Amino acid sequence: MADRRVVVLAFVVLVVLWGSSFSALKVGLEYAPPVLFAGIRSILGGLAMLLAAVVWGGSPKFRRDWQVFTLLSALNVVFFLGLQTLAIMYLPSGSAAVLIYLQPILVGLLAWLFLGEGITGRKVFGLLLGFSGIAAVSAGGLLGDLPPGAALGVALGVGAALFWALGTVYFKKVQDRVATLWAVAVPFFAGGVVLTSLGLLVESPAEITLNTPFVASLLYSSLLGTAVAWLLWLGLVRAGEASRVSAYIFFVPLVAVLIGAIFLDETLSPSLLVGAVLVVAGIYLANGQPSADSSQPSSKGKKHAS
């Protein structure tokens, strides 16, 4: 029972950290260009995790697993964080969260295709119902008057979701080879170096305004929204099926929409309550334990790590 409470608490903390990070990023992007902001944020988060990995993470085995670290860096940081930051620049933070959280649907499908995880009709319906709730929450933002560049923002958000899903499923595939702490720390630090280098090529550090909102946004998004949140995320993915873990993350855009409305004056759709009901119902269906769902698929094809 104690373990169950710890898992629930970890999900709650993760949801709050990731949900609030969208608004924090939106604030920070008012004072810094996007690629440099994403790179510096990732480096700071990676450094914090490197300290933890050195103390508690065991041996990273770089020589053996350099390809694993390279792929995790590319998928979970360079492409995902880079595209996510650009999407938030072009869209309201809540709308960007909705698009990026296509990820749980994609993880369920990719885990079925590549990891052999079960994908029953109940789970599919629950995942789709949950995403319908997310879409309902921000329907006003996505279908109403959007800011200039919104079409590009939508494409960037969907791209970020795809790369995050690929990174999550790939980590699930190789989780027995790499320690979780190193799987967070190295990709975020290395990916941050890549993003910062790209930023220095296409942006100017002179565009950064060093003020209190920028520093607060950077520290919050890097230390809490990146270091702490990603450690929780990969730890939870390690503990269960990637698709089941991802289903709970449907709560994050709800938090992002609410925080964006409260603190950034973003439009709060009246469909929020309907969306919340759909999300909760979707989570229940996707993560329930009916006898037909729980026994069969779990033993088949679960260990495909190479």
Image: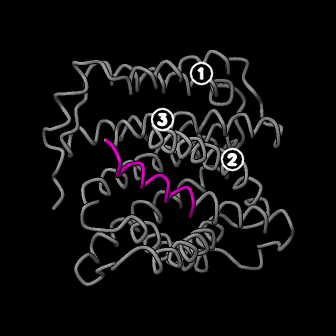
Q: Which residue in the structure is indicated by mark 2?
A: 20
**Residue 212, label in figure:** none
Return the disc, 3 or 2, that comes first in the chain's sequence: 2
Label 3 residue SS: helix
C-alpha gap between disc 3 and disc 2: 16 Å
> Residue 172: x and y, percent?
30, 53
Range of residues picked out in magenta? 227-240
Check if residue 178 falls in the magenta segment: no
Label 1 residue SS: helix
Q: In the image, is 259 to the left or to the right of 60?
A: right
Three-letter code, disc 3: Tyr
Return the disc, 3 or 1, that comes first in the chain's sequence: 1
Three-letter code, disc 1: Ala
Residue drawn at (52%, 49%) of the image: 156
Residue drawn at (58%, 39%) of the image: 252
**Residue 248, label in figure:** 3
Relative to 30, does residue 188 appear above or below in the rendering? below
- Which is more toward the observer, 225 or 32? 225
Relative to 25, does residue 130 appear above or below in the rendering? above
Q: Which residue in the structure is indicated by mark 1?
A: 136
C-alpha gap between disc 3 and disc 1: 17 Å
| In front: label 3 or label 1 | 3
Relative to 66, does residue 8 appear above or below in the rendering? above
Number of other residues with Cα within 10 Å of mark 3, as a class: few under 14, some 14 to 19, many 20 or more: many
> Residue 39: x and y, percent?
58, 71
Q: In the image, is 138 to the left or to the right of 81?
A: right
Locate residue 95: give its quadrant: top right
Is the C-beta separation of discs 3 and 2 under 8 Å?
no
Number of other residues with Cα within 10 Å of mark 1, as a class: few under 14, some 14 to 19, many 20 or more: many
Locate residue 66: give its quadrant: bottom left
Relative to 306, does residue 304 appear above or below in the rendering? above
Q: In the image, is 204 to the left or to the right of 248?
A: right
